[in-house]
Image (cartoon, helix red, strand yellow):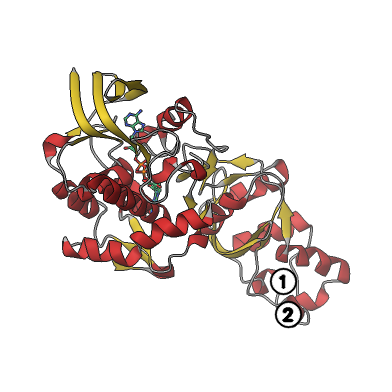
Amino acid sequence: MKKETEILILGAGASGLMLAALLERDDYLIVDNNPKIGSKILVSGGGKCNITNGNLKAKNYLGEQRFVRNVLKRFDNYDLLAWLEERRLKPIVRKNHQYFCEHSAKELVSVLEREIARKKVLLNLEVKEVKRAKRGFEVITNRGTIVAKKIVVATGGLSFPKLGATSIGYEIAKSFGHKVSTLSAGLVGFTVQPEEFFFKALSGIAIEVTVTVGEKVINGSLLFAHKGISGPAILDASLYWQKGKIAIDFIPSVNLEAVKSSKKNISRVLGLPNRVAKAFLEKLNVEDRACKELDAEEWKKVETLKWYSFAPAGTFGYSKAEVTKGGVVLDEVDASNMMSRKVENLYFIGEVLDVTGELGGYNFQWAFSSAYVCAKGLNR
Ligand SMILES: Cc1cc2nc3c(=O)[nH]c(=O)nc-3n(C[C@H](O)[C@H](O)[C@H](O)COP(=O)(O)OP(=O)(O)OC[C@H]3O[C@@H](n4cnc5c(N)ncnc54)[C@H](O)[C@@H]3O)c2cc1C
């Protein structure tokens, strides 16, 4: 196969599809290694895709704040919702201002699909390398070569390899002299060290906690998991964790001073599910009996539940991570059109860039906002 096109979009994920949908020209092709488009969108948000968030700020992202702000303001959450509504998709708001598809993530993929001519999409096509050619770029794939004048790298990050994720975007960037910051799994659960192996026996139970990672304080749910800990608060904490300790308040709504004279057993006043309370008391070596009978030494141990500090062993890794932290360094990309500042006609959008959003729809919003800015540049 030998093809030629003016614009070649690498990746039919959130950012690539939105870009194709917004292009006001039809001299483009979009390629993806999957057998269908929007693979990650389809599994996201528990199958309902958390599209965006009603509360959108640059500070919801790791990444150079001015760059992020400049891109988001061009196509923010309201612009996205209006764009979708014009196409008869009206997402519903759930807790924490999160907007989801009403029934299924397929609703979003269908909207994007309708905006893109079917013959523009080449599937089961894996990009292996991009080289400079006489008239632009030569893209080497598993099914031959495609020559393109402009290339948009929309190949996402490393998370969920089973949905097609590869390192190609970072490799292309590096081969053209771009810096790629350190990559790691983000929005992911933590594995634990032997001292916390007792968490595993609580697998499946969720509780409300406050997690502190460095300067960052996060309130939300923690889910005890087979491999360690997960849940929204932990996923967000993973964005700010490098190595070292985190602290968890397992009983954020409990005032221990107020219960010290209670006749109730200590396991009953912690506001924790019985199994969790019992597991922690056993770990702390505190016998479960009336609060007023506990001595000062025992209260000291119970108080550690308010600041349970430990070092996770690591994360669940890319196979379970929702995103990849790090990416193509922003100061080498033009925020006005997403074009490389090093190589003319080479563009980067979406997760491949060094921008990572918190949990809550921020990563799709970034994919769509960066696609919009790129589309405006290419439509000019
Ligand atoms: C399980 C899960 C749930 C998520 N839920 C949410 C959520 O609810 N809300 C939210 O905001 N974010 C969510 N995310 C994150 C979100 O999916 C990503 O941030 C977003 O999809 C990034 O968009 P993108 O276009 O940059 O990359 P992607 O959507 O990953 O698209 C990149 C595309 O490029 C293709 N590709 C990669 N390498 C090659 C290659 N060599 N050749 C050809 N094609 C290639 C990939 O197969 C993929 O289709 C979730 C992620 C996961 C894994």
Left or right of 155 on screen, residue 186: right
**Displayed-image quarter of ligand 1:** top left
Q: Residue 359, can we see it? A: no
Q: Residue at 20% across / 62% down in the picture?
A: 89
Q: Nearer the viewer, mark 1 or mark 2?
A: 2
Q: Residue 110, can we see it? A: yes
For label 1, the residue is 266
Circle 2 SS class? helix
Q: Residue at 50% across / 53% down in the picture?
A: 204
Circle 1 SS class? helix
Point out the tag, 1 or 2, that comes first from the N-terminus: 2
Q: Position of residue 361 (x, y in %)?
A: 39, 58
Which sits in the foreground, 23 or 116? 23
Which sits in the foreground, 265 or 198? 198
Q: Quadrant of residue 94?
A: bottom left
Q: Position of residue 322 (x, y in %)?
A: 45, 46
Q: Is residue 151 above or below residue 228?
A: above
Q: Position of residue 211 (x, y in %)?
A: 63, 60
Q: Quadrant of residue 346?
A: top left
Left or right of 380 on screen, residue 306: right
Q: Residue at 27% across / 46% down in the picture?
A: 19
Which sits in the foreground, 206 or 91? 91
Q: Is residue 204 above or below residue 217?
A: above
Q: Is mark 2 within 8 Å of ligand 1?
A: no
Mark 1 and mark 2: span between their CA atoms?
A: 9 Å
Q: Is residue 270 above or below residue 135?
A: below
Q: Residue at 66% across / 45% down in the picture?
A: 312
Looking at the rendered structure, the kind of residue marked 1 is: Ile
Q: Position of residue 53 (x, y in %)?
A: 39, 64
Local crowd size for mark 2, using a 10 Å CA cut-off: few (<14), some (14–19), many (≥20)? some
- The quarter of the rendered structure image containing the N terminus is top left
Label ID, residue 259? 2
